[in-house]
Image (spheres, coloured by chain):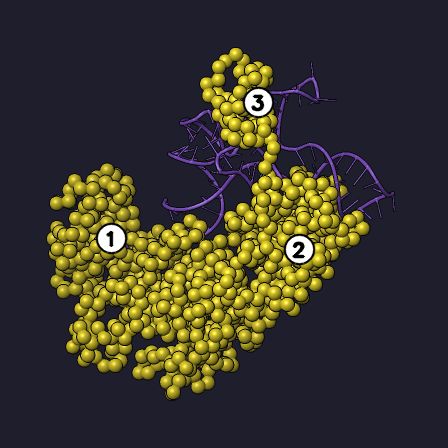
Chain colours: A yellow, B purple
Amino acid sequence: MDYNFREVEKRWQKEWRDQNIYHVTEDAGKPKFYVLDMFPYPSGAGLHVGHPLGYIASDIYARYKRQKGFNVLHPMGYDAFGLPAEQYAIQTGQHPAVTTRQNIARYREQLDKIGFSFDWDREVRTADPKYYKWTQWVFIRLFNHYYDQELDKARPISELVAKFTANGTAGVRAAETKPLEFTAAEWNAMSEKEQQETLLNYRLAYIADTWVNWCPKLGTVLANDEVVNGLSERGGFPVERKLMKQWILRVSAYAERLLKGLETLEWSDSIKEIQRNWIGRSEGAFIRFPIENNENTLDIFTTRPDTIFGVSFMVMCPEHALIEQITTPDQKAEVDKYVTWARNRSETERQTDVKKVSGVFTGAYAINPFTKERIPIWVAEYVLAGYGTGGIMAVPAHDSRDYAFAKHFNLPIREVIAGGDIEKEAFETKDGIVVNSDFINGMKVKEAGKCIIEKVKEMGIGYGTVNYRLRDAIFSRQRYWGEPFPVYYKDGVPYMLPEEELPLLLPEIDEYKPTETGEPPLARAANWTYKGYPLEYSTMPGFAGSSGYYLRYMDPHNDNEFISKEKNEYWQDVDLYVGGSEHATGHLIYSRFWNKFLYDLGIVCKDEPYKKLINQGMIQGRTNFVYRINGTNKFVSLNLRDGYETTPIRVDVNIVHNDVLDIDAFKAWRPEYADAEFVLEDDRYVCGWEIEKMSKSKYNVQNPDDLVERYGADTLRLYEMFLGPIELSKPWDTNGIEGVFRFMKKFWKLFHDGSNEFCVTDDEPTRDEYKSLHKAIKKVEEDNERFSFNTAVSAFMIAVNELTDLKCHKRKIVEPLAVLLSAYAPHVAEELWHLLGNTGSVVDAAFPKFDASYLVESSANYPVSFNGKVRLQRVFPADMQPKEIEAALFADPDVQKYLDGKQPKKVIIVPKKIVNIVC
RNA sequence: GCCUUGGUGGUGGAAUGGUAGACACGAGGGACUUAAAAUCCCUUGGGCAUCGCGCCCGUGCGGGUUCAAGUCCCGCCCGAGGUACCA
């Protein structure tokens, strides 16, 4: 073989490693550029095929930027804590650290084969104590801060304590779990324990009893983004609701800033929209409804204060604290029954019958503050505990859920916005005219809403407010393989470990299961105490370690600081972040929160961590099928199936090439197929195919290693880019890799003669040769800038085809072309770079300079169209003026023929593009 | 339901409002070979054509703007992703 990729790739991978060529240091003389991939969780299955796609794209961009004179930071690491390693540990007793280390070694091997330009000196692993020391360190800071809504930033909790000591809660505007009011005297009279418990209401990391998503199968709680359709994201196990004491991060305090910050980011509209929806900002009103014969009020949040005259009942969530106090004796039994039932229903059950109406009357009544009407108070599951106040005013005429409820329980439906047909369905418009509503009659919805808000303010029973769907993030996991909390308990109150005790190391335990009493695995650890006080048993969730990892890459070996000021100011933020869009509501929210908190503390200099985000599309599997004739061991080729009763059977894609089955391999694949017979078309067995999720059981998993083995890393890199736009989801289809491989061989031949001797001359290239080169430079540069790597690969193909036709073996052409290609196919480019007699590495070669003069045409071809239809081609000098072109055209007999004696109404000449004559 | 996307040959996909289908795969035909591999050349959206002139139709569907629309606007249909008793 002429182009020996195996030898070339092996040589340069070794050389790059020996020379440490991808190592970067801060260099004030160069502008910085930070290209980051979402680091992988090292699973036992090895690098999955979706990964290389993003990594290759970011690697190309990183190399390109380096050639453009930037000092590029391009690191890689591992998200090393996680469930699978622990599940495996439970089954086998193997320490998760051991399996994780093995998996990492495997990943590293796979990554190295593809020729990435990662600076491995900066590698981070979240499970490394040197790393998680800083995760614990940030946690302590979260605990020690609260969110000041006046200053709109996190402030030390000591400031809050000072305020409480001086004035109590008067004048304090702080993000809180529930509203509290006390005086300075009351605060000062509190015991240490009481004060500490009160402060938990404000801390950015706090512990509280909360309804959680409990997954019994995994033995841990899960965050909202880890629950998909009522099932755990990992494993797909049922999830229940449970009231538990949990560590929680007050992410909600940052809701508005997380929302606002999106505007400054170069992210795709879709992912910004996902985050906007997840944050779920809604403007409305907080209103207190008095309760008949009770000093409590029923507090509600509504986005439609304008419909307050249409309220015909109130609803509280089953978790509501007021239920017990207001339920009348004769309703008590029924309410208790319902509440117990509803509270214990699993998240999974709730999800499946969302449309079923259920609820119970408490016997109590609220008073409509405007009409003084008695309004029955109900308890129903459709009102959620976690949103707003856990209570609503129901306006069945204008809300479909209230409508369904009212219909089911036969409650009155009162129209207050004109224009709908409330006999049939709720009229949910947000711009209509208010009716049947006393002093707001005739107003538009918006205006009426404002008016009601003014009024309730005056009456002292409410105010306009903003609510967010974004919940605080549950931060405890009842698992072993995570960061231990630097927390000990004294008198049941949590305290932080002193910083000099960090890292608090994960203790060794004999088994990785929960204890018999249901305590988390850490309860098994011997002497898990600090100065005799018990340490926290739960560990941190997966997103803890990944929330600030991109900062640690800037200063990975600093044992004294999380990150030094100088390094942070040099690298600042991530210029390009590449990863899957599945992290939109998880990692990408938490990480932004984490960063904003550190920004408030002055630890980082940028408010947003990831300036530009590219989401590589998902890689789907492409399954091949063979068709067995029912009742036989005979298989019929795809297009001959008519007339047979067949069953499609999945077949391993590795024994199918371009949809043609390798029959011998198939016979060897499974014993039952050893004596299979075939009905062939054109002597071949053609398989069917379908796009499905990639999975082992569907036999459609393509291992990148096999492709590297067969075609080389450079071909794999080019091919993955050539598949299509990076952001598009596409099936992993290797039918086309041959074309890219052919291109590589052709490219190689530009530098070699027929007998594979290196052969490049110093002859001056022709104009056509320069033109091919500069066309490619222009196109590749533009395409790199807009992340259109697939079209850039096409540009290479065109250039190489042209230069092959021109039999060009000239240094002035092929050398810049190799430099240009080096971001995509670094190994072969490096080889040629050295064959050309250069020293150093092609990664540091300057990106070729585009010279437009080579593309200037002496003449331009103009399609001439009549009323928009192209009829003729005419060539004019490129610098000819439109007026002259027009004159020349009308002297042309063919043009006259098409005009057919008519006078043209208008002549449009787009320079170098087209002439259109309107007649 | 709502939000965000997308809909172009047999396939993956190209097209700053300016000759739709670049580039590649696959397919068909041919050259070289004892043969295979590799390589090279030709054809390849559909239809019509006394198949070497040339014409018509074509970017999910129906309208519109424009000299000119895959691209912009309006109304539908379908797919993908996100989200969903969030008041």
The picture places residue A407, in percent across and down from the top left corner, at 26, 47
| First-in-chain label (2 vs 3) | 2
Q: Amino acid at mark 1?
A: Gly
Residue visible at 43% across and 49% down in the picture: A270
Q: Is residue A685 visible?
A: no
Residue A25 at what x, y percent from top left?
Answer: 53, 67
Describe residue A116's horizontal placement relative to residue A467 as left or right: right
Q: Nearer the viewer, residue A304 or A888?
A: A888
Q: Secondary structure at mark 2?
A: helix
Residue wearing tag 3 = A871
Q: Residue at x 18, y 80 (%)?
A: A189
Label 3 Cα crowd, 10 Å radius (few <14 / some 14-19 / many 20+): some
Residue of label 2: A829
- Do the residues at pointers 2 and 3 share their chain? yes
Q: Label 3: chain?
A: A
Say left or right for A659 vs A420: right
Instruction: Say which label, 3 or 1, has the lower sequence index.
Output: 1
In the image, taking residue A495 as reference, residue A267 lies left or right, namely right
Q: Are marks 3 and 1 on the same chain?
A: yes
Pair 2/1: label in front? 2
Quarter holding residue A684: top right
What is the distance, in whole Å, between disc 2 and disc 3 at their CAs?
Answer: 46 Å
Q: Earlier in the sequence, mark 2 or mark 1?
A: 1
Distance in Å between CA atoms under marks 3 and 1: 63 Å
Q: Amino acid at mark 2?
A: Ala
CA gap, disc 2 to disc 1? 61 Å
Q: Which residue is mark 1?
A: A284
Badge 2 and badge 1 in a common chain: yes
- Chain letter of mark 1 equals A
